[in-house]
Amino acid sequence: MIMNIKPLLKFFLPAFLFSTLQISAQNNVTPKFQKSSVYSGIEVGSKGVKMSVLEIDESAKENGVYHVIKDTSINTDFISFTQPTYLATLAALNKLYEISTKDYKIPPSNIFTAVSSGVNIQAEKENKKNWIDQLIGAFRFNYNEPERKVTVIDVVEEARLSHLGIVPDSRRYNTFLIDIGSGNTKGGYFPYNNTKDFKLFQLTWGTKSTANAAEKYANGDNSLGNYDKNVNRVLAGAEQSEIIYAVNASGSYPLSDNVVFSGGIAWALATLMYPELIDNPVVPVTYDEVLKFNDKILNSHPTLSDYYIVKTLTDNTLDKEAIGKAVKTVNKVFDQRALLAGTGLMLKIMRQFTSTQERKNFYFVKNGAVGWITAYVNQNK
């Protein structure tokens, strides 16, 4: 399997140099650059609070060269908007801020705090914006920083920053970025050869929302076969009512040579499909490979366990322990049904860019969650 992707790796990975730098030094506190500064980006997201500690090369600010020293998160389910989840989120925000200041000795001026668009959208839907305001106020009070900037990111800006943080300048204007999240999908591209005008792409479908919709059709039959049938039923409707229109309306097809997928399902598939490429932050794939793997998820799911995958690796130069841990983490986050929902949605989107006349280059980015935070830090430092 590895042989058929090597030409793509040679073509794409040099262009994604900065993404490679992010991963290769993850969790390594030893400075990578001769002259650099360390920054922290802390984001309150739908599921919890994320922190990325970044070393940014001061001699190459215009290129945004950096690597990730630490990338972590604490799950709190903030968008439940209950007192327990609010308190858990505030505690997580405080803890990550203290890790930044005490463990990494980062000055407050180099710590950037933000609330994601997903939280903001859900709060607006439920008329719960006061929970965000209360959280920000309490956080500022705890550290006696009444003027601290806690930006509530809107969906367009988050998608724009994700593109800037994930896609390198050399691919900036011919790459369509699609981030498949838990509750929705967003992304887009820059149609006018500048980074200010961004064309947003949005779907109301994500991995979890697709799974939830399929489960509603169970009608008492909770078998895997019935669930898979209902996933296909849900996605067939989503394709006709939303996905086809959204892709066509974006106008991206003739302008985008590369289609890059980020988000949890992209990370999961990249890890499970190509465990031997554990050190590669970007994994090229084809529509047919993902389609074949979807069948494997349904009919041969036990072969995706960490034990089985490591056992089948024949290259003794690979770090099998690290691969096993990565695969085990994926399987903790995505069970069989979640994988079927996410992969099914992925295939419906990929199919819109698959043509006999023109073939797009598809890529999975493993560390997309860091993307917009890194761009935000880089723009505001």
Image (cartoon, rainbow, N blue to C red):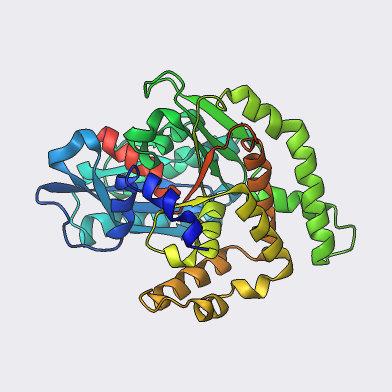
Relative to 229, 186 lies left or right: left
The extreme left residue here reads: 34
Percent x, y of residue 308:
57, 79
Relative to 212, 171 lies left or right: left
Relative to 236, 115 lies left or right: left
* Quarter in which the C terminus is drawn: top left
Q: Nearer the viewer, residue 40 or 354?
A: 354
Q: Nearer the viewer, residue 134 or 217?
A: 217
Quarter location, residue 92: bottom left
* Residue 283 in view in this figure: yes
Percent x, y of residue 82:
58, 51
Relative to 41, 108 lies left or right: left
Percent x, y of residue 159:
47, 34
Q: Which residue is located at x 63 percent, y 47 percent?
A: 346
- Asked if 211 appears above or below 189 in the picture, the reply is below
Total count of labels: 0
Q: Nearer the viewer, residue 152 or 292?
A: 292
Q: Which residue is located at x 85 percent, y 57 percent?
A: 218
- Asked if 2 appears above or below 107 in the picture, the reply is below
* Residue 381 in view in this figure: no
- Asked if 20 appears above or below 316 in the picture, the reply is above
Q: Which residue is located at x 35 percent, y 55 percent?
A: 94
Q: Which residue is located at x 57 percent, y 49 percent?
A: 286
Q: Nearer the viewer, residue 371 or 12?
A: 12
